[in-house]
């Protein structure tokens, strides 16, 4: 609804928007009463906050902890409750598999079965990724009733399977019984449109089982999280942007590709990412710049390393400021407090820097300072409209 | 919508949530510029606020003054605009009548009619409750076309009538003409499904009139506020909670029963209520703890007694803190400023205390301090998601 209005109002101009997403940025206080961001020495972020307007975002809605998929969709201005990204598709995004619009994807495990076909290990002894790659070779080139099947190794015992063909439907049951001592389950259609899909998948499982007969312990496949590829209106369509993504991790590149961004070759380090930004500044008008490691260390419960990562971003911020984008937004997709070792529902600091922002009294970029920010507390789905507005890329609604 | 999402995310764990509702908590300033809460000496609440995250809730929506029904529904996480509790049902809740799912309830007045059947007093001279109880005895045991009719005295000239049977519909007109000098109105169906219901009600009025012939001044009944019982998903269903209510007044017990709470025997005083909480802490994981008297004195325009009631809650707060619930929420269902002698639309202070909250700089639990709270200003329907999140009872949305 909001996005449809924005689509009518959006217009093209030369202004540049840089959206820096510091993954899992928000935290909760440690024993000293400070979050990771409050503990970090961030002179550049703080100075920028003083010249910007600040606030706190709720990624989806108060109290709700988002996964990376919905958190990013909201940041990009998509209703995360309307557009759900299924598990299989997220796995595909994470492997950088080139999805096509009709694809049906699922998560797979290699498992071990005994001679009676009973599952004795759902993870095939957690085989190494190297062995996984070898086993996946046995499952190449399978076509069933015209449906092409692509099997791609992920990590340890996990793989991705993509079915490419017409009329494939995600409404099917899983083959993974989620425990040992049982046979793999027949995949069943969950509604009448998915009968054909279930047949294709069961045939694939049968062929896979035959081909894996001699590859103990990885002698069976278990499938779950079937999901059709999601169709999203692109950032070009909705915002009339020419957008690019500067991300290192596959999943974030995948999410960016889903909304039509050009994926730039961004190297392996934050320094590489900044060089990529410098090099491409003239070419695109919107940059999604993703920094992952704050989230990774948050997930690991590593408070001090998350602090260090925030300080790293801070130290390189002047290079980004030198590029003088018309609008610079710095925020996170969600909070990942090290104390919780995981994503959380807490609000996320945000600053918007542009010639057209007002000022507030915020003198530090932190959770507790941003309480007093001029933007207040708001849902992240409003970030894109705000960014576009400050870039003067939205026309007036009504006369 | 929000509640359906929360339902998918909710999970069971051992954490305890206590929701203390100080009825009508919020106020507006008196001549000295202070609200009731700001006037009260509340060292315990203030100290707790310093260790909690604070904010202000809008019970339903900015500017809207709620009744007790919708205000509580919102606090319990139900969309108060979707689920409307009709007047008759609210009356039934207030009398502690054991409603069943198909019941149709209405408010009744005993009235006085003259020999021509013209209403000369809509309130039968405001008969005493004792006389009301006697008159109600005359109306017991009526059954019309298989529909059982229950008449229960309320207060003075007011009574509750409940029709129990199949296919009873609330879409009927009222019999009370709302002024004297007229006859009681025939009840008319307001849509085609309510024809049978109107017949049953008119037959009841006819029988009641006959039975009351000799009980002047209460010789007629006037009915209004017809309402079918409302069906709400329970807190067990939606949140996977095992919830209990500690309330003294019927209406609040009734509201709690509507959402599936176990109603605990809570005595007559705040001290009794706290003993009930202590005794039952191990058994339930969610407690709705309702304190009425702040609202009652607010409604009476009694500023100083409302202040005293707030101080009373404050003095007993340490007993509740001793129970160490994982999440303690203290708020009101709405504001009842003594200066307005009634409910109002003003926002309501809230604090959430838990190990997983951030801190803000709020050092006093008051309307003016909570302006600067870390939760900001938000609609009360978000209180339950927040409480559940802090109790780690909500899983992640999406991956």
Image (cartoon, coloured by chain):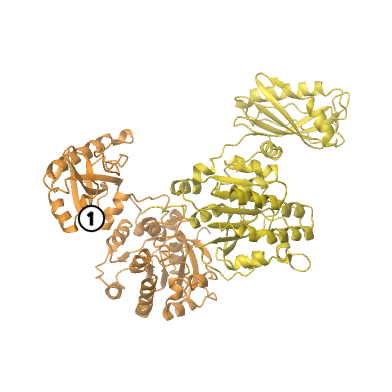
Chain colours: A orange, B yellow
Asked whether residue B306 appears in the rendered view, the answer is yes
Location of residue B257 in the rendering, given as x and y in whole percent from the top left corner: 61, 40
Task: Tell me the subunit letter for badge 1.
Answer: A
Q: Nearer the viewer, residue A317 or B3?
A: B3
Q: Nearer the viewer, residue A364 or B275?
A: B275
Q: Is residue A191 left or right of residue B235?
A: left
Q: Is residue A8 left or right of residue B296?
A: left
Check disc 1 and report its element: helix, strand or loop. Answer: loop
Q: Which residue position is annotated with label 1?
A: A97
Is residue A152 shown above or below A394? above
Q: Nearer the viewer, residue A52 or A280?
A: A52
Which residue is found at the position 33% from the left and 36% from the top?
A190
Is residue A215 shown above or below B349? above
Q: Residue furthest left?
A: A214
Q: Residue furthest front?
A: B279
Q: Nearer the viewer, residue B229 or A133?
A: A133
Please count the marks in the image: 1
Q: Is residue B210 left or right of residue B163?
A: right
Q: Is residue B85 left or right of residue B157?
A: left
Asked whether residue B183 appears in the rendered view, the answer is no
Q: Residue furthest top?
A: B145
Location of residue B157 in the rendering, given as x and y in whole percent from the top left corner: 81, 35
Location of residue B65 in the rendering, given as x and y in whole percent from the top left corner: 67, 52
- In the picture, residue B323 is in which quadrant? bottom right
Location of residue B93 in the rendering, given as x and y in whole percent from the top left corner: 67, 39
Other-residue count near label 1 (Cα within 10 Å), few / some / many at <14 / 14–19 / ≥20 = some
Which residue is found at the position 19% from the left and 54% from the top?
A127
Is residue A59 shown above or below B292? below
């Amino acid at each position: 609804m909001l996005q449809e209005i924005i689509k009518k109002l959006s217009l093209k101009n030369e202004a540049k928007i840089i959206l820096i997403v510091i993954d899992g940025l928000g935290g909760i206080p440690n024993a000293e009463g400070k979050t990771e961001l409050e503990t970090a020495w961030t002179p550049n972020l703080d100075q920028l906050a003083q010249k910007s307007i600040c606030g706190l975002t709720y990624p989806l809605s108060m109290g709700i902890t988002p996964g990376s998929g919905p958190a990013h969709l909201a940041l990009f201005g998509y209703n995360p409750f309307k557009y759900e990204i299924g598990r299989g598709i997220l796995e595909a995004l994470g492997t950088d598999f080139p999805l096509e619009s009709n694809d049906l994807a699922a998560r797979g495990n290699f498992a071990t079965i005994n001679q009676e076909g009973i599952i004795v290990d759902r993870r095939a002894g957690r085989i190494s990724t190297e062995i996984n790659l070898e086993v996946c070779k046995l499952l190449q080139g399978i076509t069933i009733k015209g449906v092409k099947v692509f099997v791609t190794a992920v990590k340890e015992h996990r793989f991705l399977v993509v079915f490419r063909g017409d009329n494939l439907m995600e409404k099917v049951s899983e083959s993974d019984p989620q425990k040992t001592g049982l046979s793999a389950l027949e995949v069943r259609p969950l509604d009448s449109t998915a009968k054909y899909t279930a047949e294709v998948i069961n045939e694939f499982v049968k062929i896979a089982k035959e081909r894996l007969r001699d590859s103990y312990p990885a002698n069976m496949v278990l499938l779950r999280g079937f999901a059709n590829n999601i169709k999203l209106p692109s950032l070009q369509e909705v915002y009339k942007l020419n957008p690019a993504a500067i991300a290192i991790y596959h999943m974030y590149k995948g999410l960016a590709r889903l909304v039509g961004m050009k994926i730039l070759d961004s190297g392996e380090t934050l320094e590489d990412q900044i060089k990529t930004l410098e090099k491409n500044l003239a070419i695109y008008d919107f940059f999604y710049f993703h920094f992952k490691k704050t989230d990774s260390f948050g997930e690991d419960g590593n408070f001090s390393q998350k602090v260090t990562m925030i300080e790293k971003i801070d130290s390189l911020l002047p290079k980004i400021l030198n590029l003088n984008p018309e609008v610079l937004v710095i925020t996170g997709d969600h909070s990942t407090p090290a104390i919780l070792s995981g994503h959380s529902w807490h609000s996320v600091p945000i600053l918007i820097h542009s010639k057209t922002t007002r000022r507030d009294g915020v003198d530090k970029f932190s959770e507790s300072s941003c309480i007093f920010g001029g933007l207040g507390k708001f849902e992240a789905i409003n970030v894109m409209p705000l960014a576009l507005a400050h870039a003067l890329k939205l026309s007036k609604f009504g006369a």
